[in-house]
Amino acid sequence: MTINPKPEKIVPVTWLLPGCLILMICLTGCTQMAGQEEEPTQRINNLTWYLGTFHEDGKAEPVMNGTTITAFFKSEGVVAGSAGCNQYSAAYSGGPDSLVIGTPISTEMFCESPQGIMVQETRYLSLLQRSGSYRINESTLEIADGNGTTLLTYTAIPPDLLTTWRMITFGTAEGQTWTPGTLTTITLQFKSDGSIGGNAGCNDYTGKFQINGADSLVIGITGMTKMYCGIGGVMELEDAYIRTLMQIRYFSLSNNTLRLSDATGNMRMLFERKLP
């Protein structure tokens, strides 16, 4: 048996999108229903936001390498997280678009490395207090001042997720367990623009993902090559993998391991970080 070495171009595969209308809504941002009032700032609650960029004096600067700054907005009106070295919290108030953050309180550790981390922390806490509004675009949060000038840009995507993962094993809803053999590899890559890609065992695939809440994850497949591979069982493996991937609703990261679970919370997929 042979493997066709020339995959065709990636084509839309709408047959891989059960409940496509629901998925489309989830991947493009949910729309408020008529007559249903939105709770103040509910779109930013229950997510850990990771700071990516500072905006000041018309310049955009990334967060320093080796540091992580986070913000978690609680429905009780408190935002808390890491300022890079110390943990902080502050009261906040707002509406669907407005956001006012009070003076933060924080722990009093001193971090020596990386160089400049304490200056960055002071800068962050200062900018946070200048907030007056916010904007959300899919998995990106921008905090702006009262005039709409962006101060801070965050992402809901954990930095540790943005890599290529190699499948170890997975189980289908029908109770079958699949483990790729030595003749094939299944990969899943998450990208910062909200897209995914990888190889399903034979064919390459593309798609999108969105993090909708704490540890929640929605994945949609939008394209796939159409090779036929003659390795025994690989096409059945590929079909089971794609179907299972579409059923994922939660994720968990631990060291170099990624666990993906279905809507019931049952772990269905286990990946390891793919080394260069």
Image (cartoon, helix red, strand yellow):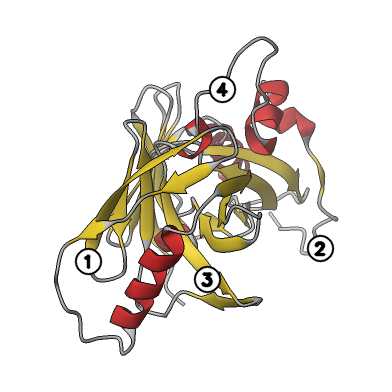
Of the two numbered discs 2 and 4 in the rendering, the one whose residue sits closer to the viewer:
4
The three-letter amino acid code for the residue at tag 4 is Glu
Distance from disc 3 to disc 2, alpha carbons, whole Å, reads 45 Å
| Crowd band around label 2 with a 10 angstrom C-alpha radius: few (<14), some (14–19), many (20+) | few
Distance from disc 2 to disc 1, alpha carbons, whole Å, reads 53 Å
Distance from disc 1 to disc 4, alpha carbons, whole Å, reads 33 Å
Residue visible at 66% across and 54% down in the picture: 148
Q: Which residue is mark 4?
A: 38
The answer to which of 57 and 243 lies nearer the viewer is 57
The part of the image, by quadrant, that contains residue 28 is top right
How far across and down, in percent of the image, does residue 113 sit? 25, 86
Q: Which residue is mark 2?
A: 6
Asked which secondary structure carries label 1, the reply is loop
Q: Which residue is mark 3?
A: 54
The answer to whether any part of residue 176 appears in the image is: yes
Say if 225 sits above or below 275 in the image: above
User: Which of the two discs, 3 and 4, labels the residue nearer the N terminus?
Assistant: 4
